[in-house]
Image: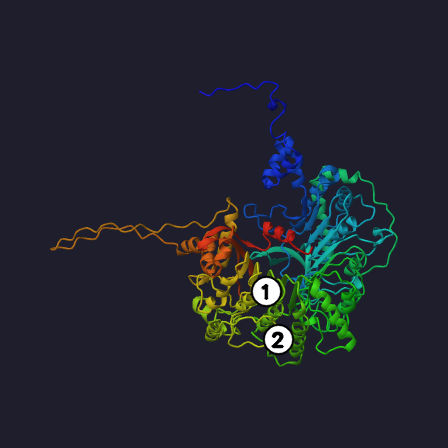
C-alpha cells in the first residue's frame, strides 16, 4: 500500500511547482526543443511557459494567401470541381487575419524577427515558366483596406530584421518594402536583410527614406527577378504566350514543384491572341478581383470595422525622380551593404534583338557604386540566353576592375567563368593592375563560385568546338584557369556549375592545390565526374524498357581500360607542386581521383549533381565502380550529395506519379496510401491417386488477383526501401574512417522524376537524406522531399551562408 506524505507549508514545494522555480535561461532552453504543436500547447496550458513559447511561435511570421472555391448551384460540392468565375485563386483572408493580430497586439508583434510573404503557388519553373511569367500581377492584393491594415501592422513590427518575399504579390511587395524602409517607422531593430525572389516592386517615390536617403540594409539577395525599368512605358510588353497571375483569368496548369501540375488562373498576353481567348479582358478580371475582395471583407466584419476606424494616411510625400527598382535599392544601400547577391536575373526578355536590353548600362552603373563594407559580391547563374551578361562586361578588365580594387574586403565572389577576362588582352597597365588585385584576392578570398552556359544535353570531357564564339569562350575560361586560379591560397569552398568541360574542372581543382578546400560543388546537366551509362546511354536503355528519349544521345563513352591503366601507374603529386595546365582528356584517372590527390585530406563536403549518365540505383554499371572508388580516400568527408537515376518503368508504363504520391502519403496519416496485397498461400498436399482410375477434379476457387505493382511499390520505392538501396550502392565507396565517425556520413541521394505527357514533362528533384555508419548501416533517413517541401525550403532559406 502506498503511503502519501503530506508536505508542510514550509516545504519548498509549497511556494510553487519546480517548473516555476527554474531560471529564465533554462525555460528558454526547454521550449527550444519543442516542435510547433508542442509550443502551441505549452502557450495555451502553461502560464510559466507561455511567454517563452510565444516568443518562438511568433519569431518567424509568413504572410501567404490561399485558394478559395466559392460554392454555387453549378459547383459539385463532393468533388470540389472548379466553377467558372467562382474560384478565388488568391484569397487574402489568411494575410488579413494575421495582419489584424499584428496590428492590434503590439506585444505579439514585437516578438517577430523575420517576416516572409509568398504566394501559395509554387515558384515558376526556371526553364519553362519563368521566362514567360511577368511578376507585376495587377489585380492581386489591391484592396485599400488591406494596405491600410498593413501600414498599421508594420508600425508594431519593431524588431523585424529580415524581410523575405518569395513569389510575392506585386502591390503587397511594394507596400512591404516601402513600409519597412520608411524612416518614420517605429523600430528597435532596423531592417538589415532583404530577400526578393520571383517578384516585382515599384519605387516611384522614394521620399519615405527621409533626408538621409539610406535604406540601412546590410544584405540584399535578388533572385529570379526581371531587370525592368521603373515605368510601364519602358517595360517589356508581354510577348505571345507570356502571362501573369490573375484573379478571374484563364484557367492554366502550372508546375507544382512536386512532379506534376496545379491549376490556377492567369492573364495571357493580348498579342496575337485568338478572338475566343480575348475574354475575360483585363478590365473584367479587375472587376472579378474587386468582387472577391468584397466577399472577403463581408466575412470579416470585426476586422472591417477596425480598419474603417483607422485614420487616413495623410503623410505628405515629396516627389522624387523615379529610378529602376534594383538600381534604386543598390544606390541607397551603399553605406551599409555587406552582402550583394544577384542570382538568375532576367536581363532581357528576348534572346536576340532585344531593343530594350539595358543590362550593359545597368551593370556599368552598378560598377560605379561603392560599398565600403562589402564582403560578398555574387553574380550567379548567368547560364541561359536571358540571364547571360552582356558582351562588353568583364570582371577583371574594363567594367569591374576598379570596382574590385575599391572593395578590398570581399571574401565571397561569384561570377561567370568566361566573364572574368576578355579573349583579347588589354593594355599593359590594365594587366599590371589585374595582377596586383589577384595578389590581394589570393590572401582574402575564401568562397569562389563559377558558372557558365549550360550546353545541350551535357558537358563534354573537353571543348574542341570550332566556331568563333565557342573558341572565344574557351580562351576566356582558360585564361581564368591559368592566370587567376593558381594564385589562390585561402579558398575553402568552390562551386562549379553549368557547361564547364570536365578537363577544365580538373584543371581548376589542380590549380587550387595550395588552398584548404573543404566544400566542392559540381552541378551540370550530365553527371560531373563521369558517364556510367555508356556511349549514347546504351546501358540505361538496356535496363529501361520504356526509354525513348534522346537526351542521352551525345554521352561519351568512358575509357575504362585507360582508367585502370592510370590507377596502376599510381600517379603522385610532386613536392613542391607547380601548376602547369594540361587541357584535354585522354586515358587518365577519374576526376575524383585527381581531386583526392590534391585535396582529400581537407574535403568535408561534396556535391555531385547532374542526371545524364549518373549512377543507376541498384544497377551499378561497369564504369560506376572506377568513377566512384576514389571516394574511399576522403577520410574527412562528412556530407555528400549524389544524383541517382531511379528506374520507374513497370508493366509497360512509367510510375513516377504513383511513386511521388506514395511519398506524399507517408507524410500524412490521413491519406489513403496504396495497400500491398498478400499473395495467395502455398498449395496444400495433393490427394493420392488410385492406380486404376483417375479421380474427377474437384471444383476450385478462382485464383486470387496479384497486384505486382503494389508489391514493387512497397519493396522498392518506399522511403525505407530507398534508404537501404542507396546505402547499399554508395556505402561501399565511402571511407571506413568517415563512416566510423559519430553520426556517420550524411548522404543525400537526389532523384529526378515527374509526370510525363505527350508534349510536356514535370520533372522535379526529390532528395532522400540518410546517414550511413559502420558496415554501411542506415542510421537514419528523411524524405524523399521535393525542394519546395516546407521543412526543407525553410531550412534552405535559413542556411544561406552569405545572406
Q: Nearer the viewer, residue 403 or 302?
A: 403
Q: Quadrant of residue 594?
A: bottom right
Check disc 1: other Cα within 10 Å, few if <14, some if 14-19, many if 20+: many
Q: Nearer the viewer, residue 578 or 216?
A: 578
Q: Quadrant of the N terminus?
A: top left
Horizontal and vertical percent position of residue 341: 71, 60
Horizontal and vertical percent position of residue 52: 66, 37
Disc with the residue nearer the chain's start (2 vs 1): 1
Mark nearer the viewer, 2 or 1 = 2
Horizontal and vertical percent position of residue 257: 59, 57
Residue at disc 1, secondary structure: strand
Q: Quadrant of the C terminus?
A: bottom right
Residue 232 visible in the current orientation: yes
Q: Which residue is mark 1?
A: 523
Residue at disc 2, secondary structure: loop
Q: Quadrant of residue 438?
A: bottom right
Q: Residue furthest left?
A: 692
Q: Nearer the viewer, residue 757 or 400?
A: 400
Q: Is residue 763 left or right of residue 134?
A: left
Check disc 2: other Cα within 10 Å, few if <14, some if 14-19, many if 20+: few
C-beta proximity under 8 Å, tags 2 and 1: no
Q: Is residue 614 left or right of residue 362?
A: left
Residue at 44% in and 55% down: 775
On screen, residue 139 above or below 758: above
Q: Which residue is mark 2?
A: 580
Residue at 66% in and 69% down: 485
On screen, residue 84 above or below 560: above
Residue 279 visible in the current orientation: no
Report the colour scheme: rainbow
Between the residue at mark 2 and the residue at mark 1, the CA separation in whole angstroms equals 25 Å
Q: Quadrant of residue 337?
A: bottom right
On screen, residue 63 above or below 397: above
Amino acid at each position: 500500500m502506498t503511503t502519501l506524505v503530506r508536505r508542510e507549508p514550509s516545504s519548498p514545494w509549497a511556494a510553487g511547482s519546480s517548473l516555476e522555480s527554474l531560471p529564465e535561461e533554462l525555460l528558454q532552453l526547454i521550449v527550444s526543443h519543442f516542435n510547433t504543436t508542442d509550443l502551441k500547447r505549452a502557450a495555451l496550458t502553461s502560464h510559466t511557459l507561455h511567454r517563452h513559447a510565444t516568443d518562438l511561435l511568433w519569431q518567424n511570421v509568413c504572410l501567404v494567401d490561399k485558394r478559395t472555391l466559392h460554392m454555387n448551384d453549378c459547383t459539385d460540392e463532393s468533388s470540389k470541381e472548379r466553377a467558372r468565375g467562382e474560384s478565388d485563386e488568391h484569397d487574402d483572408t489568411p494575410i488579413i487575419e494575421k495582419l489584424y493580430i499584428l496590428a492590434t497586439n503590439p506585444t505579439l508583434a514585437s516578438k517577430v524577427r523575420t517576416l516572409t510573404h509568398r504566394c501559395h503557388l509554387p515558384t515558376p519553373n526556371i526553364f519553362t515558366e519563368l521566362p514567360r511569367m511577368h511578376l507585376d500581377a495587377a489585380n492581386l492584393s489591391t484592396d485599400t483596406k488591406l494596405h491600410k491594415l498593413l501600414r498599421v501592422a508594420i508600425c508594431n513590427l519593431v524588431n523585424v530584421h529580415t524581410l523575405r518575399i518569395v513569389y510575392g504579390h506585386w502591390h503587397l511587395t511594394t507596400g512591404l518594402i516601402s513600409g519597412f524602409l520608411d524612416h518614420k517607422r517605429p523600430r528597435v531593430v532596423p531592417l538589415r536583410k532583404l530577400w526578393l525572389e520571383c517578384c516585382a516592386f515599384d519605387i516611384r517615390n522614394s521620399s519615405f527614406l527621409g533626408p538621409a536617403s539610406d535604406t540601412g540594409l546590410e544584405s540584399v539577395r535578388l533572385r529570379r527577378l526581371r531587370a525592368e525599368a521603373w515605368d510601364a512605358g519602358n517595360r517589356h510588353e508581354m510577348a505571345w504566350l507570356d502571362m501573369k497571375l490573375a484573379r478571374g483569368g484563364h484557367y492554366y496548369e502550372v508546375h507544382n514543384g512536386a512532379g506534376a501540375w496545379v491549376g490556377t488562373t492567369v492573364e495571357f498576353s493580348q498579342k496575337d491572341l485568338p478572338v475566343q481567348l480575348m475574354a475575360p479582358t483585363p478590365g473584367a478580371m479587375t472587376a472579378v478581383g474587386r468582387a472577391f475582395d468584397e466577399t472577403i471583407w463581408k466575412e470579416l466584419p470585426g476586422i472591417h470595422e477596425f480598419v474603417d476606424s483607422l485614420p487616413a494616411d495623410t503623410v505628405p510625400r515629396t516627389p522624387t525622380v523615379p529610378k529602376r527598382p534594383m538600381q534604386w535599392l543598390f544606390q541607397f544601400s551603399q553605406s551599409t551593404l555587406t552582402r550583394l547577391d544577384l542570382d538568375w536575373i532576367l536581363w532581357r526578355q528576348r534572346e536576340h534583338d532585344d531593343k530594350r536590353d539595358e543590362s550593359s548600362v545597368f551593370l556599368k552603373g552598378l560598377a560605379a557604386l561603392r560599398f565600403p563594407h562589402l564582403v560578398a559580391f555574387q553574380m550567379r547563374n548567368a547560364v541561359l540566353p536571358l540571364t547571360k551578361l552582356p558582351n562588353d562586361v568583364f570582371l577583371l578588365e574594363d567594367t569591374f576592375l576598379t570596382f574590385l580594387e575599391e572593395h578590398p574586403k570581399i571574401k565571397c565572389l561569384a561570377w561567370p567563368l568566361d566573364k572574368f577576362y576578355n579573349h583579347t588582352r588589354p593594355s599593359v597597365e590594365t594587366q599590371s593592375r589585374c595582377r596586383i588585385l589577384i595578389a590581394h584576392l589570393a590572401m582574402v578570398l575564401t568562397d569562389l563560385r563559377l558558372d557558365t552556359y549550360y550546353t545541350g544535353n551535357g558537358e563534354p570531357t573537353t571543348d574542341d568546338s570550332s566556331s568563333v564564339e565557342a573558341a572565344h569562350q574557351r580562351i576566356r575560361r582558360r585564361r581564368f584557369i591559368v592566370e587567376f586560379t593558381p594564385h589562390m591560397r585561402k579558398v575553402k569552398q568552390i562551386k562549379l556549375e553549368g557547361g564547364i568541360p570536365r578537363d577544365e574542372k580538373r584543371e581548376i581543382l589542380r590549380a587550387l592545390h595550395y588552398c584548404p578546400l573543404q566544400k566542392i560543388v559540381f552541378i551540370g546537366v550530365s553527371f560531373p565526374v563521369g558517364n556510367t551509362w555508356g556511349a549514347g546511354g546504351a546501358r540505361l536503355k538496356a535496363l529501361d524498357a520504356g526509354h525513348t528519349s534522346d537526351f542521352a544521345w551525345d554521352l561519351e563513352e568512358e575509357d575504362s581500360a585507360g582508367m585502370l591503366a592510370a590507377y596502376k601507374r599510381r600517379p603522385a603529386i610532386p613536392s613542391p607542386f607547380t601548376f602547369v595546365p594540361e587541357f584535354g582528356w585522354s586515358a587518365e584517372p577519374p576526376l575524383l581521383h585527381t581531386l583526392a590527390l590534391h585535396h582529400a585530406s581537407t574535403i568535408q563536403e561534396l556535391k555531385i549533381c547532374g542526371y545524364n549518365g549518373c549512377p543507376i540505383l541498384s544497377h551499378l554499371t561497369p564504369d560506376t565502380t572506377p568513377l566512384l572508388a576514389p571516394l574511399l580516400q576522403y577520410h574527412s568527408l562528412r556530407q555528400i550529395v549524389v544524383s541517382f537515376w531511379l528506374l520507374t518503368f513497370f508493366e509497360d508504363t512509367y510510375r513516377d506519379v504513383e511513386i511521388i504520391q506514395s511519398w506524399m502519403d507517408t507524410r500524412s496519416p490521413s491519406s489513403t496510401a496504396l495497400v500491398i496485397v498478400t499473395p495467395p498461400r502455398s498449395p496444400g498436399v495433393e490427394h493420392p491417386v488410385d492406380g486404376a482410375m483417375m479421380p474427377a477434379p474437384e471444383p476450385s476457387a478462382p485464383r486470387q488477383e496479384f497486384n505486382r505493382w503494389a508489391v514493387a511499390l512497397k519493396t522498392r520505392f518506399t522511403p525505407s526501401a530507398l534508404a537501404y538501396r542507396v546505402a547499399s550502392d554508395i556505402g561501399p565507396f565511402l571511407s571506413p574512417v568517415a563512416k566510423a565517425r559519430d553520426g556517420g556520413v550524411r548522404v543525400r541521394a537526389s532523384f529526378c522524376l515527374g509526370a510525363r505527357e505527350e508534349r510536356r514533362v514535370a520533372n522535379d528533384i526529390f532528395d532522400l537524406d540518410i546517414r550511413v555508419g559502420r558496415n554501411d548501416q542506415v542510421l537514419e533517413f528523411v524524405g524523399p522531399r521535393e525542394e519546395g517541401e516546407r521543412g526543407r525550403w525553410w531550412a534552405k532559406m535559413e542556411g544561406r551562408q552569405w545572406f
